[in-house]
Image: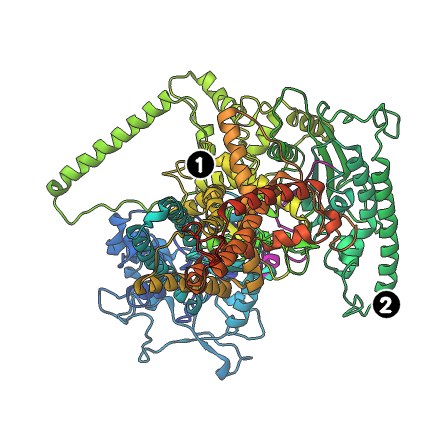
Amino acid sequence: MATNGRLIAGSHNRNEFVLINADEVGRVTSVKELSGQICQICGDEIEITVDGEPFVACNECAFPVCRPCYEYERREGNQACPQCKTRYKRIKGSPRVEGDDEEEEFDDLDNEFDPHQTAEAALSARLNVGRGNPNGSVYATPSEMDPAALGTEIPLLTYGQEEDGISADKHALIVPPFMSRGKRVHPVSDSSMSLPPRPMDPKKDLAVYGYGSVAWKERMEDWKKKQNDKLQMVKHEGAGGNNDGDELDPDLPKMDEGRQPLSRKMPISSSKLSPYRLIILLRLVILGLFFHYRIRHPVHDAYGLWLTSIICEIWFAVSWVFDQFPKWVPIKRETYLDRLSLRYEKEGKPSELAHIDIFVSTVDPLKEPPLITANTVLSILAVDYPVDKVSCYVSDDGAAMLTFEALSETSEFARKWVPFCKKFNIEPRAPEWYFAQKVDYLKNKVDASFVRERRAMKRDYEEFKVRINGLVAMAQKVPEDGWTMQDGTPWPGNNVRDHPGMIQVFLGHDGLHDIEGKVLPRLIYVSREKRPGFDHHKKAGAMNALMRVSAVISNAPYLLNVDCDHYINNSKALREAMCFMMDPTSGKKLCYVQFPQRFDGIDLHDRYSNRNVVFFDINMKGLDGIQGPIYVGTGCVFRRQALYGYDAPKKPKPPGKTCNCWPNWCCFCCKSRKKHKKGKTTKDKKKAKGKDASTQIHALENIEEGIEGVDSEKASFMPQIKLEKKFGQSPVFVASTLLEDDGIPPGASSASLLKEAIHVISCGYEDKTEWGKEVGWIYGSVTEDILTGFKMHCHGWRSVYCMPKRPAFKGSAPINLSDRLHQVLRWALGSVEIFFSKHCPIWYGYGCGLKPLERFSYINSIVYPLTSLPLLAYCTLPAICLLTGKFIVPELSNYASIVFMALFISIAATTILEMRWGGVGLDDMWRNEQFWVIGGVSSHFFALLQGLLKVLAGVNTSFTVTSKAADDGEFSELYLFKWTSLLIPPMTLLIINIIGVVVGVSDAINNGYDSWGPLFGKLFFALWVIVHLYPFLKGMMGKQSNVPTIIVVWSILLASILSLLWVRINPFVTRGGLTLEVCGLDCD
């Protein structure tokens, strides 16, 4: 390897390669060049070894220490370098000391105890002071010296000569080299020895004399400064490599802040976590006592109601366990953006930050307004990241010309918007939300030009909105012959279900520049090919197509996917993610960095729990302390290699230590067993490999290895065959997966790359490959996000939850109840599909890298729709109890009352402590609890039914894209009520419980004071259901004019049925029947 005379340093454990520009501090080739180096312990000169190289004691920082001091420190001192505190490693020819066996890399037993060779090494190393003389004399005679070591190759200096121009106090005393065999112990000096002076002129260059100057400290500081300034990280751990070290190499000095970790964990305070964990354990004990009482005390006159309630309560307890214990070790994280810049963005040098490909997915421009998509794209193009390292890919899965034209307009407006954002460093960088901020935009802005340019930019954006809205208005009426482009050719996507693949590069590095002449990030439009008869796998298939296109065109090592309505709210979001991905200490084991979802345009009280704060601020923090958060579908930065289905790098096991303290016959049996076991394992592996030809390929080394029994010519093609079976029949794409430093294959032209990009988005490309099974986004569920993250965690990868102070992304949430319920229905249906698939976490992935508590969280994320059945039954029980006069609990004893009260208190305490360490408000917690009931009895129940129909009857269900709010006024759709069958179950529960309360109270009034006591438990039960369904009631009755007729019809029908039931029960008549009494009148 050519190093051009530069110093090469590295660490095997960290897989780092450091190149130091040593043009000035060059390699020492002569004694004069070595003259500036003196030992900083004893002041002696640094010697030359037998190889003609300067002696270096510490290979990490090269702290100047002579060999005698080095050996003395190893033998008598702390065995560490005085500067960097790195333990001294044994140099060949030096005697062994304690601890050498653990890090020995060579064996030098032959030369280790040879005194003659040690003396020769000492003489040839400039005969330093401190070696003992076997003759006992202080001065060594010429006959005692090795003549080979005193050749003319190393010139010796003369002594005893003085110069007249130098005063006596300026003379320096130098120890003669022939005193090196004295009896004194190095480095203690002997004051009794008379040392002849050596004159040194301070005006001359001291290197002429071959010795160091008295100003060695200044020279050392200059030397250190040059090293720090010219340090270059050629290869860092976070970008790949095969080394699997998980922590910093202790042998590598931390030279500056840029070498420090880029992030750190911040555990939750023990004062908050310890009581929380104690309450959880106490709640488990109380639950045991509760079920012990409930099962041992059945209600015989209402056995059916009692048994139903017991089954429901047991299921609720099991669900609570799966939800609670993954929150056992919550953590927070902190990033250091300044260290990221110090490490990868050195002044005067190109940025070394990694490339990022950003995916934006959209389907229907009428439900996902193009203006929202345009704002998302503009925020991406203006992100605070090197422009040559950002590529934005927009997937139009609806092949809509409206989306295409809107992107064309967006690329033109970006030429003005991007330089404006970067010039004034504004936040957020989505123009719609920036100009909608109700803040004083003049605050902290002293530049007079800002006001002028902001007003001009706002006018330009209003004109841009008019053009986009004009396109939307024109797209409402499709021409009979379909759309045509400006050149008269028909739009290829006129038939949404049958069209070719389309790619358009709007912005590129060598293409359109901004108004200041600077390069803009890439902006590429992609619409994959669709043909009848092919399963295109919805969003997961679109994401996989984008993944292949980006690999052919830019092939960045990291990917960010966002929904079309999730704009970048924090321009440094990509840098936040890179603080984890490019961190040398732990970045190489991360598969993705997940950001929380935050939303705009939600009403103040968040009636339908759109923000989902409890999940993002409590559950996800808990998962981050185990193996990482689950993937939620948007706002996530991936490592491309993890999406390719490779296993996470594993930490190498330390080599086994052999026992040399016992006789061989003691270990003979164990050794033979180990050999036998090893051989058996190898045979088993070969057998398994031969039996299962369809075994999944997870690691690159498995792909590249040959197969036994095949001739050499075929063996050379076997890796290519395996790669094509896994990734598809595209040589360019397969080559991109093997590039060590990512990027596109060298020598490829733009035309050839675009042609290959069209090939990889063809509808039949994934046939007979591993796409959707082991590679990319995983198929088999409409919630491909949970399944994809689960597969990566099963491969041993970790994920990280990043919560910057300023939210990284913000999106639009469905604001009316109907859209919200449809969104929850889609999520629940995906979980049901995973539950009935082979990838169910209950039985999939054992023996891999998935941790037990992480498995608990995945089980909870796919079984929660099953809770709808016991929840429906449990919410119906109060009405039945009130209408029949029965109850699910017998008359309570003192012990039962204490158990019930303890259970309620433990539930409240757990909630309060979670709010405390999670930073969640009481209002958010209560809204989350309410919508858990509303969604559980509606969306989750229908998702379970649809999932069973799909599994048992093969009936496929299609999900509806959630409408994104456009600019139609604040909260204009909050009370909009759209008819959907999802509204029937909660409405029915609400009505029967209200009627049950009326019946119960009427019955108590009719029967007198004694009936009020048993009524309170039933009323509390029914009111619990009504209060939880209150947002549903308010949403339904918020605006009477918006309630659909069908809702009124169903309400009248159910009210009639319940009225007939009321008449049948007749609460105003006593339970014993009619009582006839004599009226007292004589009718005769």
Residue 740 in the image: x percent, y percent?
A: 55, 38
- Nearer-the-camera pick, 535 or 182: 535
Determine the image quadrant of residue 706: top left
**Total numbered labels placed on residues in the image:** 2
Q: Secondary structure at mark 1?
A: loop
Q: Is residue 187 left or right of residue 452?
A: left
Residue 687 part of the magenta-drawn span: no
Q: Is residue 564 above or below residue 930?
A: above
Residue 448 is labelled as 2
Residue 409 in the image: x percent, y percent?
A: 83, 42
Q: CA distance from mark 1 to mark 2?
A: 61 Å
- Nearer-the-camera pick, 495 or 246: 495
Q: Is residue 394 left or right of residue 342?
A: right
Residue 408 is labelled as none
Which class describes the residues within 10 Å of circle 2: few (<14), some (14-19), or many (20+)? few
Q: Is residue 670 left or right of residue 144?
A: left
Q: Label 2 is placed on what type of residue?
A: Ala
- Nearer-the-camera pick, 843 or 1030: 1030
